Image (cartoon, rainbow, N blue to C red):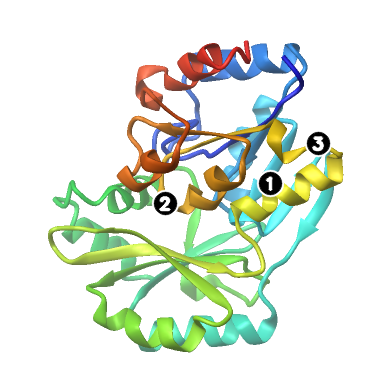
Amino acid sequence: MDQKLIFLDIDGTLTEPGKNVPPPSALKAVRRAQIRGHKAVLCSGRNYVMLSPLLQYNFDGVISSAGGCIEYGGKVVYDCPMTPEQQRRVLSIFEESGVYRTIGSRHHSYTDEGFKKFLAENAQSQANSELLRWRLQLESELDIRPMAEYDGEPIYGLVFMSRGMEPLRRPIEALRNEFHFCIQDTDACGIVNGELMNKAFNKGMAVQRLCQYLGIPVEDTVAFGDSMNDLELLQTAGYAVCMGNGSAGLKEIADLVCPSVEEDGLYWAFETLNLI
């Protein structure tokens, strides 16, 4: 098989949501693919510090902040944090609208002080996968700090959670020209969560930028994802794989649906696609 550039989302794809240790079968699949000459790149909405625990597994490249920063072979290929003016407007509009914020710079993550209490109060909402994901992350070793400690360092994006759509109307109206609102889920309790993504980049654009940098045709890429923030990733890649635990909308556009990460889905897919 010709050399492939493989893009792997993290939460819900390479690992269980909020976890930092892939199942042994996934690591075995990646290593065997690399031995055969393929390249494996992390491609996550996490900022760099939140995905850094996975760097010990020797991936060839890292795309963090949903395409806001691209590194390959230890070199920065692309870096696009918000401008100071964008940061000021984004943070103030969400705060004034009463929407919970989690932001990420390169080295730190911060969340509103009331967010953890909000998650605890609504933890019974099992239908909301993102709610569960962030509850796990806040209680794990990902070092998400209180917003009071934020000192203005450049940020790449924002994860939001709101009691219904009404509080989001003003942010959407004020920021829609520069940012895309990726709504992940609306659960039975009316809790809405999603990501604010700079229109200057997304995971699909990151695939194109890295392919151009490496001189690899986009047709020779394979992408794995599970949620709607992976939509552009799967739409852009030469071959798209959605996890069995993934969003229904993502499964519709995927070339292949594989078993979930808990069911050793990555290994199955790598073997099925003759990557190993």
Q: Are marks 1 and 2 in contact (CB under 8 Å)?
A: no
Measure the alpha-carbon separation of dots 3 and 1.
Answer: 10 Å
Q: Which mark is residue 207?
A: 1
Residue at 33%, 52% in the rendered image: 130
Q: Position of residue 89 (x, y in %)?
A: 55, 87
Quarter where residue 190 is shown: bottom left
Secondary structure beneath dot 1 equals helix
Quarter where residue 211 is shown: top right
Q: Are marks 3 and 2 in contact (CB under 8 Å)?
A: no
Q: Earlier in the sequence, mark 3 or mark 2?
A: 3
Q: Amino acid at mark 3?
A: Ile
Assess disc 2: are there few (<14), some (14-19) or many (≥20) residues with their C-alpha within 10 Å of its C-alpha. many
Q: Position of residue 88 (x, y in %)?
A: 58, 86
Say left or right for 175 vs 217: left
Q: Which residue is mark 3?
A: 216
In the picture shown, does residue 208 fall above or below 222? below
Say left or right for 249 vs 74: left
In the picture shown, does residue 78 fall above or below 247? below
Q: Amino acid at mark 2?
A: Met
71 or 140, which lies in front?
A: 71
Q: Position of residue 12 (x, y in %)?
A: 41, 37
Assess disc 3: are there few (<14), some (14-19) or many (≥20) residues with their C-alpha within 10 Å of its C-alpha. some
